[in-house]
Amino acid sequence: MNYFLDLVYSLMVHPRVALRAITRGEQWIVAGLIYLFTILIMSLSSLVEGPGVVLSFLLCLFIEMTLLLLHSASIHYVAGWLGGRGSAKGITSGFMATVCPLSILVFSALADSFSLDVIAGIISCVAIVWHFILNIIAVSENYGFTWGKSALVLLTPIAVAAFISISIMGIGTIIGVSALMNMGI
């Protein structure tokens, strides 16, 4: 347990050292415990009370695990294109550990419940930026990339998904307009 707490502390204070140990050592069990704890905290903060706490946790866990594996696979694929020398297990372990800062979103939900929207927004922005920076460090440590190349690897799947979404919306708009023009409207 001492090693686990030291690793969580190191993620907050010395993230590069901690993520190097997690990604290169492929410590998916320790990273998984960090991940489960964070998901538990995030799912409990969304509910005030009621019998749906366990169901909410399991649903959040299922959705988050699916998104984590999809995210890890797409990042590993892009990193492989760019000559990365890391492993899929290492990047998945790294991404599981980098969700740790998202646990402060509990305070954002608390501030939001007291109608402190500005403070809730600031806390949320800090958590999301911190999480993104930790993701860059995880990619950098797992694949041996520079910060810029790691950011490119992280942003490429997002850009591709945005391009596909915009293309589908554009095609739908063109089809809709042409159908309206054929109807004589």
Image (tube, rainbow, N blue to C red):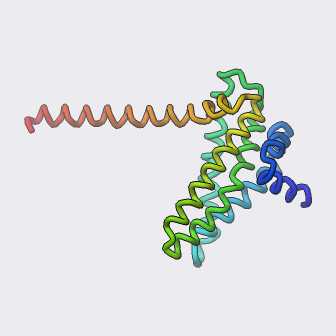
Residue closest to the eye, 132 or 60: 132
Question: In the rendered image, which quarter contains the N terminus?
Answer: bottom right
Residue closest to the eye, 90 or 142: 142
Residue drawn at 18 percent across, 34 percent down: 179
Q: Which x, y percent locates residue 177? A: 20, 35
Residue drawn at 69 percent across, 52 percent down: 99
In this rendering, the answer to whether 87 lies above or below 100 is above
Which quadrant holds residue 182?
top left
Q: Which x, y percent locates residue 136? A: 68, 39
Q: Which x, y percent locates residue 94? A: 75, 43
Judge from the rendering whether residue 130 lies leftward or rightward of residue 165; answer left or right: right
Residue drawn at 67 percent across, 61 percent down: 103
In this rendering, the answer to whether 46 lies above or below 10 is below
Residue closest to the eye, 13 or 91: 13
Question: In the rendered image, which quarter contains the C terminus?
Answer: top left
Q: Residue furthest left?
A: 184
Judge from the rendering whether residue 96 lies leftward or rightward of residue 160; answer left or right: right
Count of marks placed on residues: 0
Q: Residue furthest bottom?
A: 49
